[in-house]
Amino acid sequence: MKMPTRKFLLFGIIISLSITAVLGIIGVLWTGFGEAGRQLLVSAVVVDVASILTLCCARQARPAGLRAVQVTGILSAWLSAVAGLCAIWLAVPGSGLAEVVARAAAVLLVLAAGCAHACLLLAWRPYSRPARIIAAATMACIAAAAELIGNYAVLPGFDPGSGYLRALTAVLILDALGTIVVLVLHRLRPPLSGTAGVAARYPSPGSPDAGLPAVL
């Protein structure tokens, strides 16, 4: 994601979070708000979740694959927020349309969460061969977990057996394990030293790597 787009996106997130914070405070403090207050609070939570997922995806990235994951995550997050707001304010409770919109919002939310997790994982991934292998396996676990969880929202009356739940639990455990290992490898990699380290951390404005984030 390029810097101008990233700045515009972050500015929009700050505005949306400020608006939802004001609405949430009104919903909490305004006594007798009733159903409208509950809807305001839920709407604020929906927008806040979409904003957090967007922030997870809004890192600077040069590889085309990571940019595609970023765009997919951001679009999924805000489409999920739009669908959720429609289900809260427009759809008639108990109707078939409300259920369809809610299921669409849940599927998009799962997709956005998976993309946000993948963006964070790829951003912290070292470039050693073991780290690349572990990151690829963890990405596969992220995709598998999103598929297994998404079936609950896609299929009405979905009632999996114990084997399905065991498989989902195993995938989530492997996902968490891979993420932790990648973070540990990132922290244990040898620090940059000398002029090369300084140049990598603070590239000159005219250099090709000037758009890269600083290495922590």
Image (tube, grey):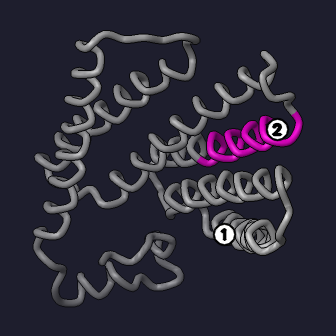
Task: List the residue tagged with mark 1.
Answer: 10
Query: How far is disc 1 from disc 2 in space, using C-alphas?
Result: 24 Å
The amino acid marked with disc number 2 is Cys
Q: How many marks?
A: 2
Quadrant in which the N terminus is drawn:
bottom right
- Seen at 16% across and 85% down, the residue is 193
- Seen at 15% across and 79% down, the residue is 191
Residue 197 on image: x %, y %: 24, 83
Q: Compare marks 1 and 2 and give the one earlier in the sequence.
A: 1
Residue 18 in the image: above or below residue 75:
below
**Could you tell me if the residues under marks 1 and 2 are in contact, i.e. CB atoms within 8 Å?**
no
Residue 173 on image: x %, y %: 20, 38
Mark nearest the camera among 1 and 2 is 2
Horizontal arrangement in the rendering, residue 40 relative to residue 13 (left or right): right
Q: Is residue 212 visible?
A: yes
Task: List the residue tagged with mark 2.
Answer: 86
Q: Determine the image quadrant of residue 196.
A: bottom left
Is 152 within the magenta?
no
Helix, strand or loop: magenta stretch: helix
The amino acid marked with disc number 1 is Leu
Secondary structure found at label 1:
helix
Residue range in magenta is 74-90
Horizontal arrangement in the rendering, residue 26 relative to residue 208 (left or right): right
Q: Is residue 8 visible?
A: no
| Depth check, front residue: 174 or 63 | 174
Residue 65 on image: x %, y %: 46, 41
Quadrant in which the C terminus is drawn:
bottom left
Horizontal arrangement in the rendering, residue 80 relative to residue 37 (left or right): left
| Depth check, front residue: 73 or 133 | 73
Crowd band around label 1 with a 10 angstrom C-alpha radius: few (<14), some (14–19), many (20+): some
Secondary structure found at label 2:
helix
